[in-house]
Amino acid sequence: MKNNAAIATDVFLLDNPSDLISIDKWQKTVNLLAELFEAPAGFLVQFTDKGFQVTVSSEQESNPYSAGVIIEPEVNLFCRKVVETRQMLYVDNAAVDPRWDTNPEVRDDGFRSYLGVPVFWPCGTAFGTFCVMDYRETAYKHTFIELIAQLKEILESDLALLGSYAQLQQLAITDPLCDVNNRRGFDILAEQRIKLAKRNNSLLCLLYLDIDQFKVVNDQYGHGIGDAVLKQVAQVLTETLRETDVVGRLGGDEFVALIAVEDVSELLTVKHRLATAFESHNGARELPQFSVSIGSALVNDSVTLSELLDIADQDMLQQKQATAAS
């Protein structure tokens, strides 16, 4: 298939990795590899759950693989061998090696030569391969093999930067005490979830939770016990709600959850399930008894996320006042 310029950025786990690294540099590195080896094709290939995906493809008419192409993980590929062995692979003439008879790159596309090196994430797991392929038999000098090893270190240094950024990004959106989303993380994920729900015509509801008389808990038992209560609330939320629901701590003793529901009756079921879960966890780990007030607001197109939070907060306060009066 014709190579039409050349980069598949959607394989990364970051929203916009091009802000961190120069994708142009990766493209130039792959182009340079193919040019120096006088080869018709060079690639940076990522190993994903779906298979081997061409992330960057050299920009030549002779290159049959465009960026974004995915080949299933069980197919007999050169790159698969590199990832499995975690070693460099040099095949000078695959046509005389029966191991590659079922390789579609050889059988269908006519490639004969392959030189590839493994590329690793900073943690040591395989990102994929950096490779060059030729339709002819080759006899690369040792200096060429050293060259591809040096070029792949450039790519790995960028992956190290991406890995560090991902860790910092996670820290920036996670509440360090309760290990749920902080306000910033909740806002980001909730906005995305609301946009998806609008496209799918699905119903979402925002829950707003507040620990009753939390100041009394802190004053009577100390902030260490208060922190344990906060962590208990976060644990109940994450264990009771679905993985697809968005849970966050806004600050203090205020928690929120954006949940998917079929109708209002299911919302009542979810709130009852949460109340039951809090009751069953109450007093666990020698914690003091506590209760949680829960407000709610259905998501609709006419209000913003900030307005939804205000509506759910007001509903929570009404629930708290009703409980205190009864």
Image: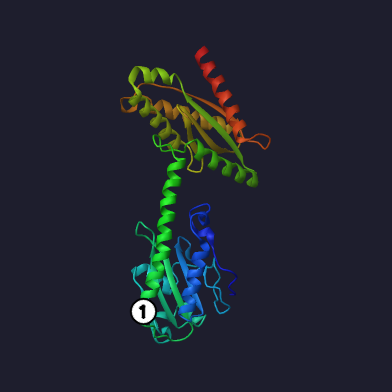
- Residue 118 to residue 300: above or below: below
- Residue 251 to residue 107: above or below: above
Q: Name which residue lies at 35% across and 17% down.
A: 220
Can residue 81 be seen at all in this image of the molecule? no
Horizontal placement of 202 versus 40: left or right? right
- Residue 142 to residue 262: above or below: below
- Circle 1 crowding by C-alpha within 10 Å: few under 14, some 14–19, many from 20: few
Horizontal placement of 135 versus 288: left or right? right
| Residue 260 location (% of width, % of height) | 56, 39
| Residue 88 location (% of width, % of height) | 35, 73
Mark 1 is on which residue type?
A: Thr
Q: Secondary structure at mark 1?
A: helix
| Residue 305 location (% of width, % of height) | 60, 35
Quick one: quadrant of the N terminus? bottom right
Q: As rendered, which of 185 and 154 lies closer to the eye?
A: 154
User: What colour scheme was applied to this rendering of the protein?
Assistant: rainbow
Q: Residue furthest top?
A: 325
Number of residue marks:
1
Q: As rendered, which of 70 and 274 lies closer to the eye?
A: 70
Disc 1 target residue: 143
Q: Residue furthest left?
A: 286
Horizontal placement of 32 versus 299: left or right? left
| Residue 254 location (% of width, % of height) | 48, 28
Horizontal placement of 148 versus 6: left or right? left
Can residue 123 be seen at all in this image of the molecule? yes
Q: As rendered, which of 323 and 172 lies closer to the eye?
A: 172
